Amino acid sequence: MRRLIIPAAGAAMLGAALLSAAAVDFEIRAAEPAEASLTPTQIAGESFHIQNPVHSDGLMHHYVVESRFGLFTAYGRDALAVRLREVAALTTIAKTSDTEVVLKSVSRGIEEDARSVVQVALNPVGTVIGIPKGIAHLFSGYKAEAGEIAAQV
């Protein structure tokens, strides 16, 4: 029994020594500037820039996008492209003011009202004749809705 234990222990120690020596042989990639792997438009834009240095695991780069909206990480160039599009979308949203949205909504409403006034002016008789039909259609919708509610109860 002792004869088996000593060689097995020796083999285990030899294997551990070989594995630790092999682990030292692997190259650890050094950090590099963003300019080494990206174009100038990808490095910095209107509201973002890539933090230096860029780290790599030997397969892909680990980018950190710093913007006024926060820090975003990206693993690889494809993920970086997605993050840059997201930052561009956030920038566009930030530029759109609430006042601008209200003005566009009001102008659309005014355009629709103007079309209605023009339609009434061009066909006044048809408009007057159509009013009762419109009211009847409105009440038929209410009647159908009431029927659905009654069926559920």
Image (cartoon, rainbow, N blue to C red):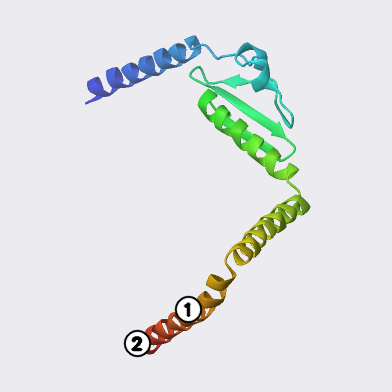
Q: Amino acid at mark 1?
A: Lys
**Residue 130 locus on image (x, y percent):** 51, 75
The residue lying toward the viewer, choosing from 149 and 4, is: 149
**Measuring 34% from the left and 87% from the top, which residue is drawn there?**
151
Q: Secondary structure at mark 2?
A: helix
The first of marks 2 and 1 along the sequence is 1
Determine whether 56 is above or below 133 in the image: above
**Residue 12 locus on image (x, y percent):** 34, 20
Q: Which residue is mark 2?
A: 151
Q: Is residue 129 left or right of residue 55?
A: left
**Residue 49 locus on image (x, y percent):** 71, 26
Q: Which residue is mark 1?
A: 133
Q: Is residue 149 left or right of residue 115?
A: left
The residue lying toward the viewer, choosing from 152 and 72, is: 152
**The quadrant where residue 111 appears:** bottom right
Residue 33 in view: no
Image quarter hosting the C terminus: bottom left
Determine whether 74 is above or below 32 in the image: below
**Measuring 67% from the left and 60% from the top, which residue is drawn there?**
114
Q: Is residue 130 left or right of residue 43?
A: left
**The quadrant where residue 48 appears:** top right
